[in-house]
Each structure stands twice: as C-alpha cells, then as structure tokens.
Amino acid sequence: MPLGWAVFRNYVEHAEEIGGDVADYPRFFLMPESCHVESDSDGMNVVRLGHPTDHIDHEVELVIRLGEGLKPDLMCIGCDTTNRTRQGLAKEKSWPWLEGKSFLGSAVLGTWAPWDPRPKRIKLSVNGELRQDSTTDLMVHKVDDLISTLVDWYGISPGDYIWTGTPKGVGKMRPGDSIICTMENDDGQIVSTMKAECVL
C-alpha cells in the first residue's frame, strides 16, 4: 500500500505568506492511500471539500513516485488540499494536523509522466484565474535531499509518493469551482495536467 510523504514549507514565499519559517531540513507529514485520488487518462478528477463551512485551500505541487532502488520513476502535477479551519484549531490546541492535511480525498493527482529531474513550471488556476505560478527550481530542499531524509528516517518503499511542497498563492476553494493544474517542461510543453470540479 503506497504512502504519500509530503514536505511542508519548501518554498520561501509560501512559508512567508502563511506566517511560517523554512525548516533547516525537510520535515514531512503522512498522506495515507485514502488521501490520494487518481485522475483518468485525460487528467479529469474531483476535489472534495468536505464540510461546507470549512475553509479549504488549494496547493499545487510536483508529485513524484518512487520506483526500484527508491529512485523517482514517475511524476505528476497534484493539488494538495488543506483544511485551514481544522488545521488552525489543531495549531491552537497543539493537536496533530491529521484532520487538516490528511483527510479523505485531500491529495488530488493529475496525469503521470516519466520522471525528468529538470526544473518544471507548475501552475494552478481557479475558474480561469491564475493563482499559483512558479518553478520547482525554487524548492528549498531538492528532490535528492527529500529522498535522502526519508530513507534515513522513515523507511520508504517503492511505489510511495513524495509531495514536494507548494509555492506562494494558495487560496480558498468553493463548491462549483473549476480547478486546472499544469506542469510544463523547459520548452513550455505540458507534461502533466489535472482538471477538477470542487464538490462537497
């Protein structure tokens, strides 16, 4: 059963926009299999927001799948969703973040492509409005560092996913919103895409 390992605050400007610091080494939270929602071959998917009164943010990310030898073999664009209402309460009460970050359907995946270590442009729009637009070259902790830390501390396995963090521009989603995420290579070619409607 694959697990998702999600690094947090891996882009400086995102850490600043949520009032946090960048960690001196990669720190992770777990995303069980039940979090992950695979797209179809065209990248069509759904974002489930859950409770209608909760504040749910989008977070576009590069997602990596580990192959044999714990080397990346596939990559895709993903939308990690965060329940700020539940996460905020957990912070206030010093509770675990599980409700805010690892709830059912919180990790929405796009189409998979062969792994390519070169920097990628990742983007997310809501109802046609571009909200996140950045390059993976701005990650504080690079992919090799993420894998090394996971190997040393956690005993990861082939088939596991690594969520590599989100850039600035996270924002609230509402029922009926249309979400489009893309990942482009250096030539501007889209190598992974995800299109989803937000539902309760």
Image (spheres, helix red, strand yellow):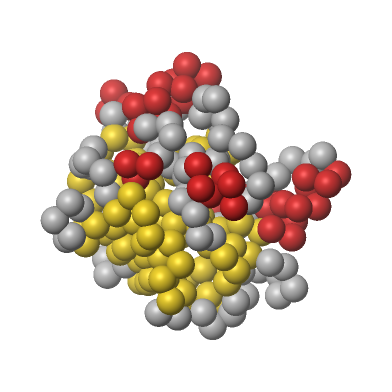
Residue at 59% over, 52% down: 17
183 or 97: which is nearer to us?
183
Q: Position of residue 20 (x, y in %)?
A: 64, 42
Q: Residue furthest right?
A: 93
Q: Is residue 47 left or right of residue 102?
A: left
Residue at 37% over, 32% down: 142
Location of residue 30 with respect to 82 vertically, above or below: above
Q: Residue furthest bottom?
A: 176
Q: Position of residue 97 (x, y in %)?
A: 70, 44
- The answer to whether residue 77 is seen in the rendering is no
Q: Residue furthest top?
A: 152
Residue at 53% over, 75% down: 198
Location of residue 145 with respect to 75 vertically, above or below: above
Residue at 17% over, 60% down: 189
Q: Is residue 50 left or right of residue 131?
A: right
146 or 125: which is nearer to us?
125
Quarter that holds the C terminus: bottom right
Q: Is residue 172 left or right of residue 70?
A: right
